[in-house]
Image: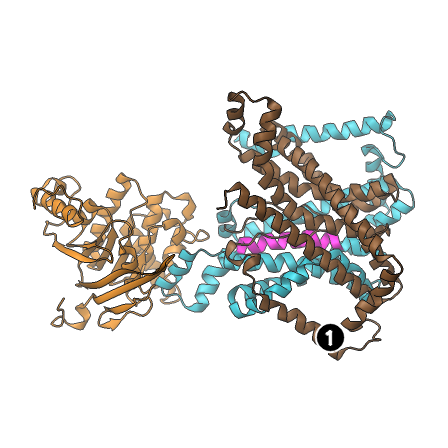
């Protein structure tokens, strides 16, 4: 919680005593209260919680799409008031996030066209597509691609903007298990390559432990971060060998317990 | 797409009532929007003159229509229009419903009849008027035929696509329960088709009114349309505007009625959802 | 491949259609179907040849098409602009939508006598009618199209930090395209049909007047020929518009699915 020593450029996302209130059918409801968050530059952080816990809402506040009712949310020392520069969000529903009337290439270019020269734009698009392995599909329309490929296009679109922070809202939630694993590994590689910060929202415990440096567990109603669990597994991680390590299993267990889903045995 | 444009208007002298997303539905349109039309009328009233040849002020309109009312011309004309409207719409609903369901129930029949139906759909109501007038004469049957033919299409199309989309199980279940064919049609098919029929009526209703007026204007068969045409020929501009307002009122009434009817059935069918 | 072609051409359908024509032909010849004024298809073809050879078909066709298309183009320009303005500027919508709905409820055909009164028996009158007829579907469909943009797409525009101008130009407009095209198609149909009405009631020229004229002159073959031409016109114009739209906006039209 004390990042005051870190230089401004390295300061990432910070929330202090954040409160989010939504107006429901029976009046205003506090979704999150007293939330403190601190994400260091280059970190891969997962925000984990059961469905409806408020993790998506928290991400939307960080993305600048929603206002907090109380407390502060800052990026690089400046309060978040609308989508901050250098922060890009990737949504779960890829089919609605891509523009169906644009080819893959033009979809990826959406965020940077007009902001950089044409040559620069083309090279950034090509780079981003290469990072997600979609170089060959550049001229297809999204509806011709599989779900996993469409989500990769969305990620490529974010990467093309060369963000310092990538916010991801359950990006692999709508995909089948095998595609999910493949994309998880691609994401790891991309993050290792670019060194960007990733805030990853999910309800999948395995995914959270596998991908992150830290797992932040949201619990309670209204929710706050009940547990902050460091994941000190070696990188690069592997779907088979990493998941067999006792360290991984122990972490997994701790996270389940933090969620209140444990078997109650290991106190 | 949130706007349902699946029920395409046939090629007739009609108006397309688009289905807009629920958020901007009729119930949500602010009444303040009427200010525009009220303001326009007020400006006209103040800026115009009573005896302008082409643009008499609104206060003159009612006065100009009054003699028609007093001479017992207006009400019978409205009655004639209403009769054609209801009769025509009713017939079109039955014919469209039955044909649409039939066509929708079999892929083969659908494919076989498609080009023929499309061809017939391409004939606008206005073009049918002189043709049918020649064949059937200037009679009530002709008027009815002209109204029924184009009005059938929206209902036919809606029923056809509803029937096509219906699960085949729906008709099998009552049979397995031992219901006769007639009973399963009465108790299952017809109620299941009702929303589609109403969806078609939603578009067909205003259409029926338009075509009725169309026939009356072109052929001068008795009705509101013939009064309009007569007023125009006699250069009674105030009367023309007055009758136009009446026609507009009828149009609004029809729109309102079909929307309510559709809403009522929709609520019943989806259990109030 | 052959199967798909077969599917598109629909031989069963065409055969049925031809079958009906044959029935019609035989019915009239054998005297089973009674009217002197219901000519068999063969005679309709003769009528078609006659009006084509004499040139009157082309004169009338041109007259009607010019009026209808001119009015339609005007309605397209005004309608799309108005529909977009209504969709993008909430205050405009609030203070005018109800009025638009009231005017829209007026049966369009009732405007024809008004137009004849004000503009007389002229082409201007026809164009005015075509304009009004086409205006409403275009405005309403454009409006719906501008509003039809998904909320997620709007958010994408925000997280990618698109300028306000870019959000309208790159997101709202393309999302609205398929709706606008539907509106344009409906408008075109109505413009054509109402132009016919105005020719029957007002301006003695064009296809509408020809239909009336042939009817009164008791020439059913030529009248039916004109009827067929009118139908074919509508179909052809629609097909041309749809094809043009698909060529101009391949992405949007493909995304909207088969628009027919």
Please indicate whether residue B119 sits to the left or right of residue A56 in the image. Answer: right
Magenta-span inclusion, residue B151: no
Q: Which chain is cyan?
A: C
Instruction: Tell me if mark 1 has few (under 14), some (14-19) or many (20+) residues whose alpha carbon lies within 10 angstroms of its own.
Output: some
Magenta-span inclusion, residue C185: yes
Q: What shade does chain A have?
A: orange
Looking at the image, which residue sits at the far right?
C217
| Residue C190 point in image, percent of width and height | 70, 53
- Look at the image and give the residue range highlighted in magenta: C177-194
| Residue B254 point in image, percent of width and height | 69, 52
The kind of secondary structure element at disc 1 is: helix
- The answer to whether any part of residue B217 appears in the image is no
Disc 1 target residue: B44
Q: Which chain is brown?
A: B
Please indicate whether residue C125 sits to the left or right of residue A3 in the image. Answer: right
Relative to the observer, which residue lies in front, C142 or A184?
Answer: C142
Q: Quadrant of residue B107?
A: top right
Q: Residue at x 56, y 69 (%)?
A: C92
Relative to the observer, which residue lies in front, A220 or C148?
Answer: A220
- Secondary structure mostly seen in the magenta stretch: helix
Q: Quadrant of residue A89?
A: bottom left
Q: Residue at x 58, y 38 (%)?
A: B161
Please indicate whether residue C70 sits to the left or right of residue C2 in the image. Answer: right
């Amino acid at each position: 919680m004390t990042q005051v020593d870190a230089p401004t450029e390295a300061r990432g996302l910070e929330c202090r005593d954040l409160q989010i209130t939504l107006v429901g059918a029976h009046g205003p409801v506090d979704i999150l209260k007293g939330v403190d968050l601190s994400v260091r530059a280059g970190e891969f952080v997962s925000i984990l919680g059961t469905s409806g816990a408020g993790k998506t809402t928290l991400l939307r506040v960080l993305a600048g799409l929603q206002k907090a009712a109380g407390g502060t949310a800052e990026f690089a020392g400046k309060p978040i008031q609308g989508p901050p520069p250098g922060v890009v969000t990737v949504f779960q529903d890829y089919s609605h996030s891509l523009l169906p009337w644009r080819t893959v290439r033009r979809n990826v270019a959406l965020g940077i066209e007009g902001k950089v020269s044409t040559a620069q734009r083309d090279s950034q698009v090509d780079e981003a597509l290469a990072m997600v392995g979609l170089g060959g599909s550049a001229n297809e329309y999204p509806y011709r691609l599989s779900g996993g490929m469409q989500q990769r296009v969305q990620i490529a679109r974010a990467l093309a903007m060369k963000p310092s922070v990538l916010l991801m809202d359950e990006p692999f939630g709508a995909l089948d298990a095998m595609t999910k694993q493949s994309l998880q590994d691609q994401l790891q590689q991309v993050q290792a390559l670019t060194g960007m910060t990733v805030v990853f929202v999910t309800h999948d415990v395995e995914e959270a432990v596998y991908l992150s440096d830290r797992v932040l567990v949201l619990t309670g109603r209204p929710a706050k971060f009940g547990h902050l669990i460091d994941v000190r597994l070696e990188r690069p991680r592997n779907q088979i060998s990493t998941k067999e390590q006792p360290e991984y299993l122990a972490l997994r267990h701790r996270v389940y317990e933090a969620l209140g889903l444990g078997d109650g045995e290991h106190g | 797409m949130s706007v349902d444009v699946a029920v395409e208007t046939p090629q007739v002298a009609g108006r397309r009532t688009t289905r807009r997303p629920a958020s901007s539905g009729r119930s949500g349109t602010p009444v303040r929007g009427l200010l525009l039309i009220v303001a326009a009328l007020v400006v006209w009233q103040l800026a115009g003159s009573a005896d302008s040849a082409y643009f008499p002020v609104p206060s003159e309109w009612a006065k100009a229509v009054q003699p028609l009312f007093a001479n017992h011309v207006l009400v019978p004309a409205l009655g004639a229009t209403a009769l054609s409207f209801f009769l025509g719409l009713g017939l079109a609903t039955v014919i469209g419903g039955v044909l649409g369901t039939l066509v929708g129930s079999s892929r083969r029949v659908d494919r076989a009849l498609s080009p023929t139906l499309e061809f017939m759909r391409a004939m606008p109501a206005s073009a049918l008027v002189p043709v049918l007038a020649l064949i059937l004469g200037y009679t009530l049957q002709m008027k009815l035929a002209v109204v029924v033919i184009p009005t059938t299409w929206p209902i036919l199309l809606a029923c056809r696509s509803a029937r096509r989309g219906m699960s085949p199980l729906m008709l099998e279940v009552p049979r397995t329960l031992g219901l006769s064919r007639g009973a399963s049609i009465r108790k299952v098919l017809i109620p299941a088709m009702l929303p589609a029929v109403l969806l078609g009526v939603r578009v067909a209703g205003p259409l029926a009114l338009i075509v009725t007026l169309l026939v009356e204007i072109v052929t001068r068969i008795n009705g509101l349309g013939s009064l309009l045409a007569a007023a125009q020929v006699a250069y009674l501009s105030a009367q023309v505007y007055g009758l136009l307002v009446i026609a507009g009122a009828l149009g609004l009434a029809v729109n309102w009625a079909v929307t309510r009817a559709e809403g009522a059935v929709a609520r019943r069918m989806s259990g109030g959802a | 491949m052959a199967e798909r072609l077969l599917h598109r051409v629909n031989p069963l359908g065409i055969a049925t259609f031809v079958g009906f024509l044959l029935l019609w032909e035989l019915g009239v010849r054998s005297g089973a179907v009674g009217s002197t004024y219901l000519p068999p298809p063969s005679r309709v073809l003769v009528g078609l040849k006659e009006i084509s050879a004499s040139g009157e078909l082309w004169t009338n066709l041109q007259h009607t098409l010019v009026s209808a298309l001119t009015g339609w183009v005007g309605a397209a320009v005004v309608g799309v602009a108005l529909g977009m303005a209504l969709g993008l500027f909430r205050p405009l919508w609030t203070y005018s939508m109800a009025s638009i709905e009231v005017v829209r409820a007026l049966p369009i055909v009732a405007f024809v006598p008004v137009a004849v009164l004000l503009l007389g028996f002229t082409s201007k009158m026809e164009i005015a009618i075509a304009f009004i007829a086409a205006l409403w579907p275009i405005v309403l469909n454009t409006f719906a199209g501008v509003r039809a943009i998904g909320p997620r797409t709007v958010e994408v525009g925000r997280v990618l930090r698109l300028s306000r101008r870019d959000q309208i130009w790159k997101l709202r407009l393309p999302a609205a395209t398929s709706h606008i095209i539907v509106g344009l198609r409906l408008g075109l149909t109505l413009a054509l049909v109402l132009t016919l009405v105005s020719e029957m009631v007002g301006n003695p020229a064009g296809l509408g007047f020809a239909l009336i004229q042939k009817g009164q002159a008791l020439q059913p073959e030529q009248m039916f020929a004109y009827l067929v031409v009118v139908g074919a016109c509508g179909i052809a114009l629609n097909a041309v518009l749809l094809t043009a739209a698909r060529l101009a906006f391949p992405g949007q039209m493909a995304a909207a699915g088969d628009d027919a």
